[in-house]
């Protein structure tokens, strides 16, 4: 069983790695409307005309969810 504290630490580390990855990706590609935002446990990745992805922590379920425009 994963404790709430362990979940928080793992989820936050995962979110930080995702932010770093997508920030670095944005520096390497040319895509109009590309943007990465993180606030209150919600990572929003805007890919211009390809849509917006949302990745967020779900502490009650001890999960990380992805919402995609597909």
Image (cartoon, grey):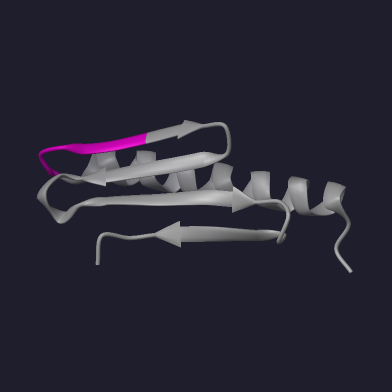
In magenta, the rendered stretch is 30-36
Q: Residue at x 24, y 67 (%)?
A: 70
Q: Residue at x 26, y 43 (%)?
A: 46
Q: Is residue 46 left or right of residue 64?
A: left
Is residue 34 shown in magenta?
yes
Q: Residue at x 33, y 45 (%)?
A: 45
Q: Position of residue 1 (x, y in %)?
A: 89, 69
Is residue 14 shown in magenta?
no
Q: Position of residue 12 (x, y in %)?
A: 66, 44
Does 62 sit above or below residue 24? Answer: below
Does 63 sit above or below residue 5? Answer: below
Q: Nearer the viewer, residue 1 or 30?
A: 1
Q: Residue at x 84, y 51 (%)?
A: 4
Q: Is residue 2 left or right of residue 15?
A: right
For residue 23, which quarter of the picture?
Answer: top left
Does 14 sit above or below residue 30? Answer: below
Q: Is residue 16 left or right of residue 37?
A: right
């Amino acid at each position: 069983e994963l404790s709430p504290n362990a979940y928080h630490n793992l989820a936050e580390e995962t979110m930080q790695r995702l932010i770093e990855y997508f920030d670095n990706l944005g520096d390497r590609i040319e895509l109009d409307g590309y943007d990465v935002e993180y606030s209150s446990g919600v990572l929003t990745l805007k890919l211009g005309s390809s849509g917006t992805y949302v990745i967020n922590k779900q502490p009650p379920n001890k999960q990380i969810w992805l919402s995609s425009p597909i």
